[in-house]
């Protein structure tokens, strides 16, 4: 869990978008592990998209093994996402193959601009996609 940058309340993950690999130290770990989640503050509804990437190929003093990036998510985008998550059978299951998860995964595969807030928009089919506020 993370702390809301707007009001300092504890944020809660509302959707686990993607996960790949096995966490470091767990049986079956093979160098890489990554995940993407979207957390929301229950107090002010501010959101935070977080992407975590672990790569222990190099020695730890040569490059960081663990890196993460985060983007604030506009409140109106959080509200759109929460409404459409009702169509997902298991929002906290990153391997879910529902159209909602597939659309979120597709829209986060490409790099998002750093330090630019994002929002959730809906496609013509009513599926959520992550977009930089600069792309609107």
Image (cartoon, helix red, strand yellow):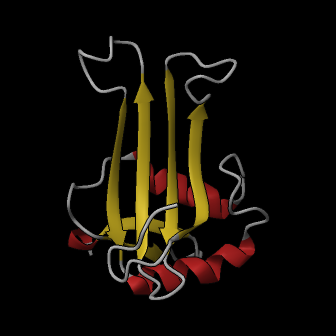
Q: Exactly how many numbered labels are in the figure?
A: 0
Quadrant location of residue 64?
A: top left
Say which residue appears at 52% left-offset and 85% top-offset.
79
Does 127 appear above or below 24? below
Does 86 appear above or below 23? below
Question: Is residue 81 left or right of 57 when viewed as pictured?
Answer: right
Does 40 appear above or below 114? below
Quadrant location of residue 48?
A: bottom left
Give the image location of residue 13, x and y in percent. 58, 65
Say which residue appears at 59% left-offset and 75% top-offset.
125
**Residue with the most extreme right position:** 89
Say which residue appears at 27% left-offset and 76% top-offset.
136
Does 101 appear above or below 33? below
Question: Is residue 117 left or right of 29 when viewed as pictured?
Answer: left
Say which residue appears at 66% left-offset and 74% top-offset.
85
Give the image location of residue 8, x and y in percent. 38, 77
Give the image location of residue 81, x and y in percent. 55, 76
Give the image location of residue 5, x and y in percent. 33, 73
Question: Is residue 54 left or right of 19 when viewed as pictured?
Answer: left
């Amino acid at each position: 869990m993370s702390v809301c940058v707007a009001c300092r309340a504890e944020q809660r993950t509302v959707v686990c978008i993607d996960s790949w690999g096995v966490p470091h130290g767990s049986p079956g770990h093979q160098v890489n592990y990554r995940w993407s989640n979207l957390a929301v503050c229950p107090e002010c509804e501010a959101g935070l998209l977080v992407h975590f990437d672990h790569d222990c190929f190099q020695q730890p003093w040569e490059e960081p093994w663990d890196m993460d990036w985060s983007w604030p998510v506009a409140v109106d985008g959080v509200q759109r996402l929460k409404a459409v998550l009702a169509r997902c059978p298991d929002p906290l299951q990153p391997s879910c193959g529902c159209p909602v998860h597939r659309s979120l995964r597709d829209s986060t595969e490409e790099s998002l601009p750093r330090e630019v807030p994002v929002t959730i928009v809906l496609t013509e089919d009513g599926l959520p996609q992550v977009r930089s506020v600069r792309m609107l």
